[in-house]
Image (cartoon, grey):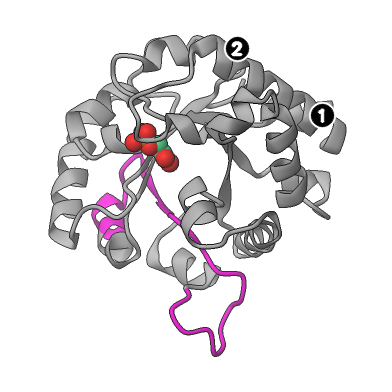
Amino acid sequence: MRTPVIAGNWKLFNTVAESLALVRDLKALVADAQGVEIVVAPVFTAIHAVAGELKGSTIAVSSQDVYWEESGAFTGEVAPCLLKEAGCAYAIIGHSERRQYFGETDETVNRKVKAALKAGLIPIMCVGELLEERESGKTMQVVAKQIKGGLADLPADDIAKIIIAYEPVWAIGTGKTATPAQAEEVHKSIRSLIAALAGTQVAVGMRILYGGSVKADNVDELMGQEDIDGALVGGASLKADSFARIVKFNK
Ligand code: 13P
């Protein structure tokens, strides 16, 4: 009932030429994949070219961030309507690297989610706890605060359009994946929280992705969990064959 989403976050990797080569290979490898939404998130400078290359394919494009204003004196920022024009259908918002290195807060995430929705982009809103927060038993407290903050003031029908990505910070780029049971526990709690915020129907339909060292050899087990509806993939999305294998997960 929930269409799975497999999204590749390329982070700060790939030139325009490298991005184009990657999606050309990927297009061929996933052409026969069915029942899955496939998304790639290149750096800003490659979005337009990648979207052009992917026109008519089954692969959609996301940005890795977005600003909340549509235009104005905001040097260095990129507006949601411009991302949409460049070919994006999705926007990753609140990635832990942005929270950690670029001062992203629940409040800025909330502004960005609202602006993305207004422009017709699907937000992929990221949440996740630090290692010390997990070790001190605060995982759900932290994740709930991020979700409530990120979704503040949004009506249920807007919440229904959003994708949430649970990415435990300690599992990102470390090769240390959350066990399927650890991930499922958090995903289930997130779904209950969404039910409390926006009703059961919205919660049942919401796609909740897992991110953090997802690879070709652990995706099947993760996707086998009831409340894991997809993956947000970093490192393993930079190679066409490994990302294609993740897209073709066995549930
Ligand atoms: P890795 O898959 O490289 O751990 O990165 C996960 C991530 O941050 C995706 O947004």
Q: Amino acid at mark 1?
A: Ala
Q: CA distance from mark 1 to mark 2?
A: 16 Å
Residue 228 image point, x, y percent? 55, 20
Which of the two discs, 1 and 2, labels the residue nearer the N terminus?
A: 1
Is there any visible trace of residue 4 in the rendered image?
Answer: no
Question: Which residue is at a point 34% across and 26% down the rendered structure image?
Answer: 247
Question: Which residue is at a point 24% across and 52% down the rendered structure image?
Answer: 13
Residue 69 image point, x, y percent? 61, 76
Give the position of the C terminus as an image quadrant.
top left
Q: Dot 1 surroundings within 10 Å: few (below 14), some, or many (20 or more)?
A: some
The residue segment tinted magenta is 50-77
Question: Which residue is at a point 83% across and 50% down the rendered structure image?
Answer: 155
Q: Nearer the viewer, residue 148 or 119?
A: 148
Residue linked to disc 2: 226
Quadrant location of residue 76?
A: bottom left
Is there any visible trace of residue 216 in the rendered image?
Answer: yes
Mark linked to residue 90: none
